[in-house]
Image: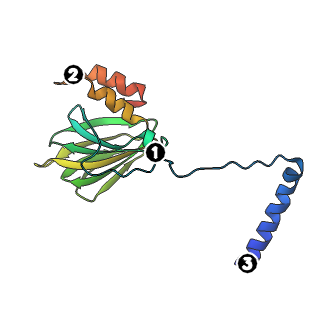
Amino acid sequence: MDRKKFLKTSGFGLGLALIPSILKGDLKFKEINFLSNNPKIVQDSEGTILNVIGDIQTHKLVGSDTENQIVEWVDNVEPGVGIPPHVHTKEDEIFRVVKGQVEIMVDGKTQILNAGDIAFAPKNIVHAWKIVGTEKAKMITSAFPAGIEHMFIELAKLPSGPPDFKKVTEICGKYGINFV
């Protein structure tokens, strides 16, 4: 069947399928807004800075900016700092390395990421990362849907010094993140 004939017959078939609903008044159309009503431009020097147990994060976009679709922050992290293996049950994450080297493990596969490299860690998949090499790393991290930024705010309020892993685990657990 050629394209023109297909479009004519499928349109006709769709129309026939909808006629009973139209006649009964059951057909309702819902407006879907795919774009946020709050456009935002964020300069490199802007954002909310949090020290999340040694991970210096600058939050650029949060849920209230994006109708809770996505949160994005920049990690500026010293060598040796990292996040141990864990699982998110609510959000997916994307890691984009801008500078330095990041050793990332996703679903048991470990690889060194350099500037320009990206990793995707879907929810319910074990992942971890650590800054390797001798220079500070810069990484842009996105999580979707938004919500995890509230956990980071709680973690940033913990006292400085070695973290109380029990307290960290408790806070993370409230947001659906579990260490393995």
Snapshot quadrant of residue 127? top left
Q: Residue at x 48, y 40 (%)?
A: 68
Query: Residue 96 appears at what percent x and percent y?
Result: 30, 53
Snapshot quadrant of residue 172? top left
| Numbered badge on residue 159 | 2
In this rendering, position of residue 94 left or right of residue 111? right
In this rendering, position of residue 64 left or right of residue 17? left
| Numbered badge on residue 66 | 1
- Circle count: 3
Amino acid type, label 3: Lys
Q: Label 1: state its secondary structure.
A: loop
Amino acid type, label 1: Thr
Q: CA distance from mark 2 to mark 3?
A: 67 Å
For mark 1, does the 10 Å Cα neighbourhood hold few (<14), some (14 to 19), or many (20 or more) residues?
Answer: some
Query: Residue 101 appears at what percent x and percent y?
Result: 19, 52
Q: Residue furthest left?
A: 134
Above/below status of 25 relative to 85: below
Q: Earlier in the sequence, mark 2 or mark 1?
A: 1
Q: Label 3: state its secondary structure.
A: helix
For mark 2, does the 10 Å Cα neighbourhood hold few (<14), some (14 to 19), or many (20 or more) residues?
Answer: few
Query: Residue 111 appears at what percent x and percent y?
Result: 26, 52
Observer-side mark, 1 or 3, equals 1
Q: Residue at x 21, y 44 (%)?
A: 76
Which quarter of the rendering shows the N terminus? bottom right
Q: Residue at x 80, y 71 (%)?
A: 9
Amino acid type, label 2: Pro
Observer-side mark, 2 or 1, equals 1
| Numbered badge on residue 4 | 3
Q: Label 2: state its secondary structure.
A: loop
